[in-house]
Image (cartoon, helix red, strand yellow):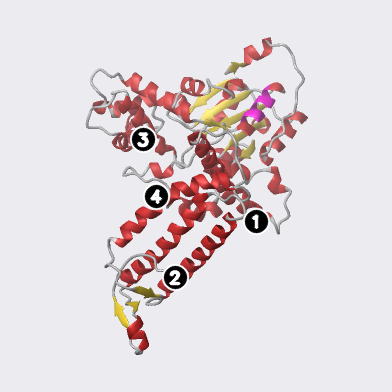
Amino acid sequence: MATAREKTLTSPKPIARPKLGDLALDRLADELSAGSISLVTSDVFDTIVFRPVGAPVAIFELIGEALVARGMLRPQITAAAFGRLRATAERRARVVRHAVYGDHEASLHEIYRQIEPILAEGIALGEAAALEVAVERDILVPNLDVVATLCYAADCGVPVVAVSDSYLSAGHIRELFAQPVLEDLVLADVFTSSDRRRNKGGGLLEEIVAELGVPAARLAHIGDHPEADLIVAQRMRARPVHLDRHQPDLTEVTEREQRFGERRVSGYAEQYDGGLAAVRAQLLRSHQLDAVSPALAPYWRWGATVLGPVLTGFAEWIHERLVELDSTRVWCFMREGAFISQMLAASVPQLEREIDEANAELEPLRSFVLPGGSRLDAELHICRTVCRRAERLLVALAKEQSVPPEGVRYLNRLSDALFVWSRWVNRMLGAPETLWEPNAAASGASHQTESGAADQS
């Protein structure tokens, strides 16, 4: 990360206004161009950088994994246990700080003092705390629009100050920024609440403008928090640039997505979202949405924040499969069968396992089974019939042109699975199973049983 002095010693270059996707930052760039801003302060977490987790405390388990891997915790302390203890230690450190000094701004060292007993013998507090900072640095993702805006402010000769309500020190923040993209930032200074023992709501922003001698009216403050960033800047009569990452209309979508996510005992792993929450918030502040008509805006938001991530995840999945197959070429599987054939081939063994598992709960089949017994059973029989029809059509097509054999095998096993599932469903529902018996049918009688197994078409 460059310093303001190093910046002045470099050769001059033309000031190019960045193209920003975020509407609020784009408006700030206009004000910087007009010379109406004399100082830019920016929140750090969820503003300049974001963590790929739904909640900040979710990273504590990752830190625990790193500590365990290096033998820095006592043997009985797991990564999940460390995650919970680390969160508790921070709360305790703040309570102690308030009891002794009257503020809640605990430092990282003070937090680790609370969990010193769980560190392995010979491990210093500073060593464990340094590893936490290193893990933070490795997982952080820069907000490119914010970084571009801050670099543009520095190019315009406007001082840029990073400010954070954090247990991390200014030195720690500079360590976090010692990586590609972030090292381009030219910071006049870094203020943290643990260094200054006051947070933004307690006068930290006022302290910055006082030290730098800049009128609050010429300050632009960038941040995501509705109170610590937005309201505080408004109270000072500064220019707030609110980057709201909390979207209430996405709450239901997020809850549904978490049903399919990995969950661990600690409860933190379910919050690992790969930065999806932050990216969604950026999309909903973009120029593109501003240009969409009100009637189409709901559809644009749904596509950008829900369907977009799904398709992006699918593209990532395709890439992973290509790596496994040592392939460098992708075919559109709606037109070509070469790619999907690999997927189908991998699916057949799983189908066969599911067939065997369901069959194990059924009685041996002594005769053909007639559809019925329950509505779901009848619907599964219809699906099986459609699947068999597709299999016959594919076999006929194979006589005229090349057809991946995996496709035929998959349809064959899928129809068998649908048949077994139809019988299994009746068993679970307690519905009777009607067997086809030719002699009984001829005499107008029928026979019902509770179970049996294997395709009959």
Residues marked 3 and 4 touching at CB (< 8 Å): no
Distance in Å between CA atoms under marks 3 and 1: 37 Å
Do we see residue 245 in this rendering?
no
Foreground residue among 114 and 444? 444
Q: Earlier in the sequence, mark 2 or mark 3?
A: 3
**For mark 2, does the 10 Å Cα neighbourhood hold few (<14), some (14 to 19), or many (20 or more) residues?**
many
Left or right, residue 351 beside residue 176: left
Is residue 150 shown in magenta? yes
| Image disc number at residue 299 | 1
Is 371 above or below relative to 219? below
Q: Earlier in the sequence, mark 3 or mark 1?
A: 3
Three-letter code, disc 1: Tyr
> Can you identify the residue that label 3 sits on?
61
Q: Quadrant of the C terminus?
A: bottom left
Q: Which mark is residue 349?
A: 4
**Horizontal arrangement in the rendering, residue 114 relative to residue 415 (left or right):** left
Judged from the image, the secondary structure of the residue bearing numbered disc 4 is helix
Residue 396 percent coordinates (x, y): 57, 60
